[in-house]
Amino acid sequence: MGLDFNLLNTTESGGRRGQLSLPHRVVETPVFMPVGTAGTVKAVPQDVLETLGAELILGNTYHLYLRPGHDAIRRMGGLHRFIAWPRAMLTDSGGFQVFSLSQLRKVSDEGVRFRSHLDGSSHFFTPEHSMDVQIALGADIAMAFDECTEYPADRPRAQESLRLTMAWARRSLDHFRAHRDEVPWLGEDRVPPVSPLRPGGEQRGQSLFGIVQGGMYQDLRRESAERLVEMDFDGYAIGGLSVGEPRELTLETISRVLPMLPADKPRYVMGVGYPDEIEQYARMGVDMMDCVLPTRAARHGLLFTSEGRVNIKAARYAEDQGPPDPACNCMVCRRYSRAYLRHLMQAGEALSATLNTIHNLAYYLGIMERVRKSLAAGG
Amino acid sequence: MGLDFNLLNTTESGGRRGQLSLPHRVVETPVFMPVGTAGTVKAVPQDVLETLGAELILGNTYHLYLRPGHDAIRRMGGLHRFIAWPRAMLTDSGGFQVFSLSQLRKVSDEGVRFRSHLDGSSHFFTPEHSMDVQIALGADIAMAFDECTEYPADRPRAQESLRLTMAWARRSLDHFRAHRDEVPWLGEDRVPPVSPLRPGGEQRGQSLFGIVQGGMYQDLRRESAERLVEMDFDGYAIGGLSVGEPRELTLETISRVLPMLPADKPRYVMGVGYPDEIEQYARMGVDMMDCVLPTRAARHGLLFTSEGRVNIKAARYAEDQGPPDPACNCMVCRRYSRAYLRHLMQAGEALSATLNTIHNLAYYLGIMERVRKSLAAGG
């Protein structure tokens, strides 16, 4: 009822060129997913995201649950319709933000009690509740409710955290399977969003991914992967990375965990990374990645370019009439100069975030497009 | 060397349908000019402004002089090239902002000493300096340096203010005529911006408008208009309105001053107004208007629609899936709902200002398009 994943080519180094058929889009993989926290990829209109070639964007369950609320979004037909984004979406489980943004959280086997970072109101998230919220939001892909193990974590702590995540994965999956047909758009024939049919003519529904945790302990990672695979999720994510560990450890964990995951299911590394990282991981066989880096850095004036990182606030760009990235053909680089982008930042103008973000996303999405071509050609 | 103004039709009530040929654009009049204070119409990318049909936008001399500085803009080829706006532009004289934004200003016959609202640095503006700055910026139309008479102003005060404005108009014009060939793009053959040629094959240069002041004293307004017309500017503005006076007084002043201005030159009312005002004034024979209202109100969540003003922050729109304006065909109304625009404001998202502003500008520019059609048809 969920996704189909069609591997077009696998290279010797394990890189995969594929197509991920979701209710709202056939997504070319490997794919980078721009982060649309509160139902908007910050400062970028949806039509521009389409022009940039974004096929799958992420929404944050924690933020959308608090504001405007998942019940309101359900009543309005789900997240796609609410934010006017007809292509594919993925929601995280809310777990990461509960642990990183909320206050006074209290974790039990049952779930997490926390206070909203917006107004201090008290909330209780369980795996079942996370599923209810994500089904109401109705993204193409939902994520199991997990605890993102912090770094560093000693072995007993990582073990205990993993125990919780595995129990929650089971409960997430059971609840999801029992309620997945309650997704707001299922059964509707309106266009858009329209759900492409599976080969048998059946309408596609929502999918659920499991999340591998285990801290930096490779045997715990293995245990986590094996138990999730046994539960049979629609896809698998590697979580608990990019939490402050050295980059070699990120790389080692990814390279060890990937072979533990079924080759015919999509593999998603959460929260990475820099431009060279997303290329490296894609070439190793990671199919999906997301990161706030290109969008958040843009708002602080950091541009990723073919010539390296450009801090557009720097005085040396004050009269630089060259494009932000001479090798880039995005709508920003074709039209505007470094001097103008610097001026917009200096003047605190809203257009600054918009233009910087458009370029950074074009750069990230361009990397993935080149990697896909390279993988299709064998490596 | 400056503009050509071609009146296509004049209605019985005095409304005029015309074409204003400027170096960077043939502008259809009557025209509403979006305000691009610091070299950006706040939150809206230039390509969107083009799509909306904006032909002539305004830049603020005071802001651009302070940051990034007119010398830097001159070195970069002028304001059009700096902000990547190939269509027409107009700069104000800086006078209004010197009086409304700066601190510790001291006015003498020579000019105005003031402190920057940005960093408290001291600056001295004279009519000659305003011309130098505006020539360096290189907008299609520059404005004479004036004192915007406050409201209310008693007669001696309005008289004294007018004396200053008239002396400054003379000095502005003399200095402009002596230096207008120093505009950065004149003589260049690069495209864009390209300067359409006048019928004789001569390249068009910058134009200068005079500004009628005189407070709410109609005889002072007459004196002001007559003296300016004698000086022979390229066009005439009515200033000192929308400064807090009752609307009937705005209307009366405009209707009295318009007949004092030559019919074959463009007439510009500065700083107006609400949607019904711009329509009313256009039908009376005003050719050009500018106002921060559609853009500033948008950032505060106030939308102008065919159903009246919509405060998009209101709770009643929380689940309103209708378009911001059912009668509007702009890119925002075609795609997004009131509920989504409200959510963006509630969440403090940058996209809010962008989408609200796009709609309000579409609404204002749409009014002018309808008025032009109506005027062309005789009224």
Image (cartoon, coloured by chain):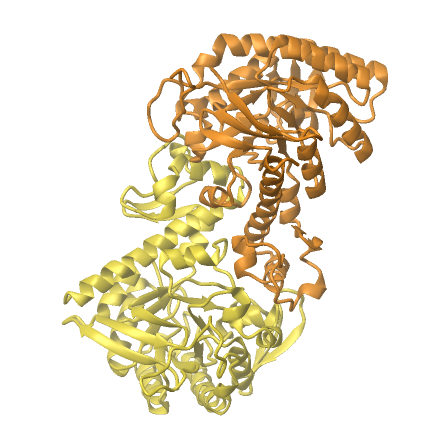
Chain colours: A yellow, B orange
> Who is closer to the viewer here, A97 or B142?
B142
Q: Is residue B225 above or below residue A64?
A: above
The quarter of the displayed image where residue B327 is located: bottom right
Rendering quarter of residue A321: top left
Is residue B85 toward the left or the right of residue A70 in the image?
left
Q: Where is residue A218 in the image (x, y as percent from the top left)?
A: 30, 79
Q: Quadrant of residue A371?
A: bottom left
Q: In this view, does A85 lie to the left or right of B238?
A: left
- Which image quarter is the N terminus of chain A in? bottom left
User: In the rendered image, which quarter contains the C terminus of chain A?
Assistant: bottom left
Query: Which residue shows up at 44% across the image and 14% down it?
Result: B182
How many numbered marks, from 0 up? 0
Q: Is A149 left, or right, of B132 in this rendering?
A: left
**In the image, residue A63 above or below residue A181:** above
**Residue shown at 44% from the left, 83% from the top:** A165
Tell which of A108 and B58 is nearer to you: B58
In percent of width and height, residue B18 lies at 56, 29
Q: Can residue B133 be seen in this view?
A: no
Name the residue rendered at 60%, 19% in the picture: B264
Identify which residue, A369 or A152, lies in the foreground.
A369
Picture residue at 49% right of the left edge, 39% below the top: A344
- B219 lies above or below B239: above
Any part of residue B202 in sight: yes
The image position of residue B123, as x and y in percent, is 60, 19
Residue B122 at x, y percent in the picture: 61, 20
